[in-house]
Image (tube, rainbow, N blue to C red):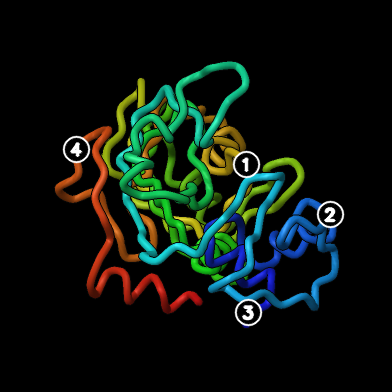
Amino acid sequence: MMRLQKYLARSGVASRRNSEKIILEGRVTVNGRVVSELGTSVDETSDEVAVDGKVVKLIEKKVVLLLNKPTGYITAMSDPQGRPIVKDLIDVEKYPGVFPVGRLDFDTSGLLLFTNDGELGAALMHPSSEVRKTYVAKVEGEISSKDLDCLRAGVDIGDFVTSPAACTLISRNPKRSVVEVTIHEGKNRQVRRMFDAVEHPVLELERVKYANLTLDGVALGEVREVKGRELETLRTFL
């Protein structure tokens, strides 16, 4: 027997915490009967579990995928407006139940993870994990050492003061600068808002590293599985 919320998480429906919300909302049935109590257990070998009327089953193989996301795609598995979505770049028949771990903006490229492991995905996205993410930003104008020091100290981006960021100047001239920046937070459009705060708007933004993972060997728009020691390192966030 298995707790229902754990069953949903291991089926790739959502993290265990979000699975609890789905149960409380009355969206889950077990053998055709609505279940809205968190203490419910199911027999994974015989009970039929459905969410919003769709039967869900335990995923036998848990995977983590690394996508080198191009710009021009929304980080979503569906879009009612019919815009390009990252799902279009993933073989969902080969990798059922995968979902994006966090998000990259429509106009941001680079490293984006997918997994069908709800517990791992939730752990990586939880603020307490402080997963380090590295970006290369091309920004307007010649950024000064003072501006970089501001980013390193933390800046006010309106509704939030960022934690100190690791910043390395790659190049600069009067028209544009290139800066590598590493953060462990994940506020909406955070890196862009950080550079806005020092009056150097972002022209191009690419995520080049996530935790221990890089884009090495992965062409734009391509996907690879994360395996071996790389996967073991990711799983230390559980």
The amino acid type, in three-letter code, at marker 1 is Asn
Q: Which residue is drawn at 51% across and 36% down?
A: 77
Mark 4 is surrounded, within 10 Å at the Cα level, by few (under 14), some (14 to 19) or many (20 or more) other residues, namely some
Circle nearer the N terminus (4, 2): 2
Q: Amino acid under label 3?
A: Met
Dot in front, 3 or 1:
3
Cα–Cα span, label 3 and label 2: 19 Å
Give the image location of residue 68, x and y in percent: 30, 40
Q: CB atoms at circles 4 and 1 under 8 Å apart? A: no
Amino acid on which disc 4 is placed: Ala
Of pointers 4 and 3, the one earlier in the residue sequence: 3
The crowding category of the residue bearing disc 3, from other C-alpha atoms within 10 Å (few below 14, some 14 to 19, many at least 20), is: few
Position in image of residue 27 (x %, y %) = 78, 51
CA distance for labels 1 and 2: 30 Å
Q: From the viewer's perspective, is 163 left or right of 69?
A: right
Depth check, front residue: 107 or 138: 107
Q: Which mark is residue 219?
A: 4
- Identify the residue position indicated by label 1 in the image: 188
Q: How crowded is mark 1: few (under 14 residues within 10 Å), some or many (20 or more)?
A: few
Q: How far apart are marks 3 and 1 (CA)?
A: 36 Å
Give the residue type at disc 2: Gly
- Position above or below: 232 against 179: below
Badge 3 element: strand
Element carrying mark 2: loop
Let me know if residue 179 appears in the view: no
Question: From mark 4 to mark 3, how far is it between C-alphas?
Answer: 41 Å
Query: Would residue 14 appear left or right of 117 to someone viewing this image?
Result: right
Q: Name the residue under label 2.
A: 26
Q: Which of marks 4 and 3 is in front?
A: 3
For residue 23, which numbered disc appears in the image? none
On residue 2, the disc is: 3
